[in-house]
Amino acid sequence: MASISAAAASPPIDLKELYDLFSWSPPRLVLYPQMENKGPSTSGSTRQPAFFDRHFSTKLALKRVVHLPSLVEDIAKTVDSALDAAKHTLPKISNGDFYTTNDRRRAVREAERNVRDENEVRAFYSYTTARFCPVVASTLALHPAASSWISLIHWTTSVSSPRHAVTDAELTFYRLDDTDDAVRREEILDTMESRRRDILKGMREKQAPLITFEFESLSAGPVVTAIPELGDFEWTHCGPPEHSCNDPQHGKVKDQVAGIVPGPDALRPPWNIREETVQSPPTTLASPLLSQEQLGTSSAQESVGVKKRKRNHASDTSEKRRRKRRPKADVDNPDHHDVSAHSLVQQAWVQATKLDTSLIVLHSGNHELICVRHRKSQTLFVSNVIEPHNCTNPGYGKLHVGVYVTSIEDMFDRMGQQSAHAGNSGEGKGGGRGAKKWTTDGLGGGDHPIEDKLALETIYVASKCRTMHMYLQYDVYDSPVPASFIRSLSLPMPPNCPSSLSSPRNHTHGLDECITVVLTSEIGRGATGVALRGTLTPENMEGAGALDVVVKLAFDDEERDSLKKEYNLYLHLRSEGVQRGITPIIGFFDDDADGLACALVMLYAGVPISDLGRNLTATECKAALSTLESIHCADVLHDDTRPYNVLIGDLGVTIIDFGNARRCSSKKAKDKEYAYLQSILQGLAGESR
Ligand SMILES: Nc1ncnc2c1ncn2[C@@H]1O[C@H](COP(=O)(O)OP(=O)(O)OP(=O)(O)O)[C@@H](O)[C@H]1O
């Protein structure tokens, strides 16, 4: 592979840019002025331990937290060693995706440092550190002899296990796809030593992540600071672990947890853990900190199922009104609790166990901890508290390149040990429980062309079914009995729907047929209710796969009107031939029992462009703008083109959330909206690229 290998004995390149990155630290983040008089944010996903966490086996649960002051230094040393070994072969800085000092300055200037909540803390990290560091870590640790700077790893919020999806993120490998970059990445892989290459390919195939990230709001600084002192850890169980609860519903979760295999720790870890701390785990069994009553999830409640919960939810309309029409960051959700050091650590440990990562980063903007999960002793080793804006020697850039590099070394060590059984890392991956990812055409969809006929048929069939059975299976929800919804607004097929789909073969689905939707995580809340992610399968359709869907649920008249309006707007766009870049809609349904709740079902369209952890490509920017143009041509003003409402996923680029959209023919208003989206996209594309 001569084309990508640099001459082995060439003199070292000028490393100034690299050292500049190593000494770079982000600015101090500031609480958004309007939030200053408010209490700590409770809008995030850190909650009291979730249903799953509370049934964690004592063999997997965390037993103690140990402060490891040498961790930051150990991590910095891995960068020095990697650089020492690689400096004669590194590609020139001008080649490839390296963020130069100027690129970095621009990105930092453009990133919003007035933050309201954990989502915005995460967005800042995503826009800065998560863009600057992966390419350097990847090149140093994996392919120092490549001819250009390119990354095999990336940071993403599209998490493999979306149990606490709002604030989670991962460092993971790029998937295999058919873009130009993917071809370059394959070439680079071919230069790697075969054993390491096989391990890496295995990790990529499983989409197994390297690091777990948990983000908190700025106000959680004291919580993060308290973690190194936690000491012996009392796991919050559903019932005393030695007399575990007898609820049959809980049994299912226990079985799920029992399937998790912790795997080995690294034999030669890149960090220095003292022998005595890993050999004698404390013998105290974890005991419950909260009673079931406190958790609000008595066995009786669990067995009532989704309908009961949904109605309780719906009846609390005054609370909903209070939080309505406010920006996302300002949502006071009664289901969410103030974060405590204990709950944050328990959540992070569970997440890392499920994903099988050794490294965990807990980050609250101006405070951060790097943590190492030691499986055998069930110990969490935590670094000194890091203040990103005050980082010197190592600077924050070096520290995070180091965290990424150490995660790669740790991965090779562990996977090398279990290469024969490398597949055992807990739960299945992917938010959609094995859901296939498809693109669509004629029914709406991102900017990618039609690919899978069976998927389209599944969408078609689902779009005709009259009844929807809906199960909730996340956090405290695990409905034994589905809620039944009836299609209440018709869904005409688009005028140019391929004829093969208007009369699909081999099935006669229609009014009497039914779809099953299993909702597995909450992904957003807003003025039109709550958005949940899950899978959809038509019942009785031979060969049907599961579709990855989002269901927006509304619970009162105001939300319902808003959701209905949004649905009608989608129909209007569809009738005007606007298809590319719009989410395919499956339908609008009403709760069969009380008619209070209603649901808008659509395909899952990916993650917001602000959370991608990489620059937007010119093609993606063009696709978003062309979609907005076609929306305008249909005389619709979106009126909410924030980065949160432009998504990228397997469907390509998709504009969502027509909750505020309205009919409008004013050219001036359309031009203004176009220019606004253009400026957002330019910022996220990185002007120099
Ligand atoms: N089709 C989809 N695919 C993936 N994620 C989605 C989809 N629809 C909604 N979401 C996620 O759910 C969040 C809330 O959805 P949406 O913005 O449509 O709701 P809303 O109630 O109108 O919110 P807001 O009041 O903030 O405008 C979005 O920011 C996005 O992250």
Image (cartoon, rainbow, N blue to C red):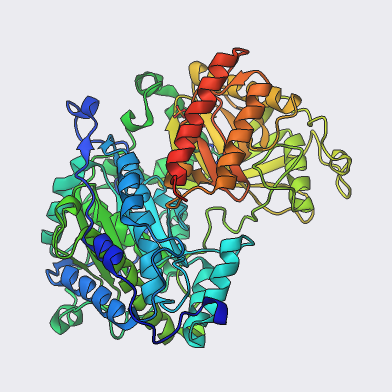
Q: Nearer the viewer, residue 272 or 92?
A: 92
Residue located 32% across and 36% down the image: 43
Q: Is residue 434 above or below residue 508?
A: below
Q: Nearer the viewer, residue 594 or 65?
A: 65
Q: Quadrant of residue 31?
A: top left
Image location of residue 320, percent across then percent down = 39, 23
Residue 602 is left or right of residue 173, and the answer is right
- For the N terminus, the image quarter is bottom right
Q: Nearer the viewer, residue 225 or 689?
A: 689
Q: Is residue 370 above or below residue 608?
A: below
Image location of residue 169, percent across then percent down = 39, 54
Image location of residue 260, percent across then percent down = 43, 69
Q: Is residue 319 above or below residue 49?
A: above
Q: Quadrant of residue 491?
A: top right
Can residue 414 be seen in this snapshot? yes
Residue located 44% across and 76% down the image: 143
Can residue 296 be seen in this snapshot? no
Image location of residue 168, percent across then percent down = 37, 51
